[in-house]
């Protein structure tokens, strides 16, 4: 396979902005345990898109050019998705460690299985991804190409976000990132779910879809979560203008550790972290109309 090696400097020549709802973008990013890795592309347009000419690159560990890539094939229907999952089907003994097979349940959700190693779906949460069309047009960027963030890109407090989580593009994102960001803040455009969560693969909620629930009447989200720096027995209070359905609190490894919500009314409630140890946690608030809000909580 011919690799598309674009240096950081050369990328400035090929970057192209897109109108909203006009071009494919990355809608989900799965970095689970072992080789349980996948990504999802979303077609926000009203027409089917043939994937001929589209390539997904991985820029691994801060490299200044793509380290591997997948040539995409198939057709994404209008307002539909395309899932690419890690293609390893058996455990492989590499001498110093065992490279495990991707979970068959995850592979069953894929429209396309990825290439053998090395390939983009061997990402570990610290690799940038770039969706390229016809070797020239940048459709979307995940992460910051050319930057090695260590084990993962993090929230401002250092909480791992891109490692050991599933990330879903927020419903109000309507186009891809086409310029290399100065800094990559994963929570700006992505909601987070626990590790090995695949329930959202194969569909994506987006404002580009005119049938999206409540899109014509959608009120901007107004939510407050406080305090985000809490003491030993201090509850986290939540108030929002949308009815709250459920909450999840999980640690930096992606393990869910709380789902209990005490509602005072449909739009307000509290969550207690009880006897959990000091450290950083992620709180997800799930509301009506498929709205999700994520924030970081620090427990002293």
Image (cartoon, rainbow, N blue to C red):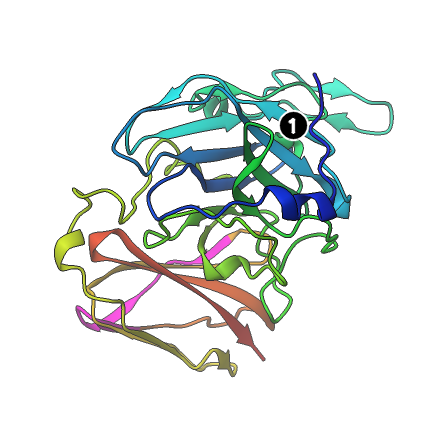
Q: Which residue lies at the image location 64% right of the left edge and 52% below the top edge?
A: 144
Residue 125 visible to the viewer? no
Q: Which residue lies at the image location 20% right of the left edge and 45% below the top edge?
A: 212
Q: Is residue 198 left or right of residue 214?
A: right
Relative to 119, does residue 42 appear above or below in the rendering?
Answer: below
Relative to 191, does residue 265 appear above or below in the rendering?
Answer: below
Instruction: Report the quarter where the N terminus lies.
Output: top right
Q: Hey, which quadrant is residue 279 in on the image?
A: bottom right
Q: Which residue lies at the image location 48% right of the left edge and 19% below the top edge?
A: 52
Residue 204 locus on image (x, y percent): 33, 40
Relative to 246, does residue 79 appear above or below in the rendering?
Answer: above
Q: Magenta-highlighted stretch: main secondary structure?
A: strand
Instruction: Report the quarter where the C terminus lies.
Output: bottom right
Residue 10 locus on image (x, y percent): 71, 43
Q: Residues within 10 Å of mark 1 (few under 14, many from 20)?
A: many
Residue at the farthest right position: 95
Magenta highlight range: 256-269
Q: Is 215 in front, or is 275?
A: 215
Count of numbered labels shown in the rendering: 1
Q: Is residue 9 shown in magenta?
A: no
Residue 77 locus on image (x, y percent): 31, 25
Mark 1 secondary-structure assignment: strand
Q: Is residue 44 left or right of residue 85?
A: left
Residue 264 visible to the viewer? yes
Residue 276 locus on image (x, y percent): 54, 68
Label 1 sits on residue: 69
Q: Which residue lies at the image location 72% right of the left edge and 56% below the top edge?
A: 149
Q: Is residue 266 shown in magenta?
A: yes
Q: Is residue 110 left or right of residue 3?
A: left
């Amino acid at each position: 396979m011919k690799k598309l090696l674009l240096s950081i400097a050369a990328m400035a020549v090929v970057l192209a902005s897109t109108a909203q709802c006009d071009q494919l973008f990355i809608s989900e990013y799965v970095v689970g345990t072992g080789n349980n890795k996948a990504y999802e592309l979303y077609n926000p347009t009203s027409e089917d898109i043939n994937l001929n000419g589209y390539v997904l690159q991985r820029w691994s560990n801060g490299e200044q050019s793509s380290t591997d890539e997948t040539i995409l094939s198939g057709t994404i229907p209008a307002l539909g998705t395309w899932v690419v999952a890690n293609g390893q089907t058996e455990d492989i003994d590499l001498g110093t460690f065992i490279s495990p097979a991707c979970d068959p349940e995850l592979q069953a959700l894929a429209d396309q299985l990825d290439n053998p190693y090395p390939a983009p779906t061997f990402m570990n949460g610290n690799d940038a991804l770039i969706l390229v069309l016809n070797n020239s047009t940048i459709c979307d960027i995940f992460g910051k190409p050319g930057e090695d963030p260590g084990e993962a890109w993090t929230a401002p407090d250092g909480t791992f976000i891109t490692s050991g989580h599933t990330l879903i593009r927020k419903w109000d994102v309507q186009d891809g990132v086409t310029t290399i960001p100065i800094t990559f803040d994963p929570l700006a455009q992505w909601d987070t779910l626990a590790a090995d969560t695949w329930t959202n693969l194969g569909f994506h909620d987006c404002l580009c879809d005119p049938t999206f629930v409540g899109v014509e009447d959608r009120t901007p989200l107004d939510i407050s979560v406080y305090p985000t720096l809490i003491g030993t027995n201090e509850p986290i209070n939540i108030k929002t203008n949308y009815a709250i359905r459920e909450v999840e609190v999980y640690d930096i490894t992606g393990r869910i550790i709380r789902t209990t919500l005490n509602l005072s009314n449909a739009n307000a409630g509290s969550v207690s972290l009880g006897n959990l140890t000091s450290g950083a946690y992620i709180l997800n608030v799930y509301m009506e109309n498929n709205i999700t809000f994520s924030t970081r909580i620090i427990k002293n």
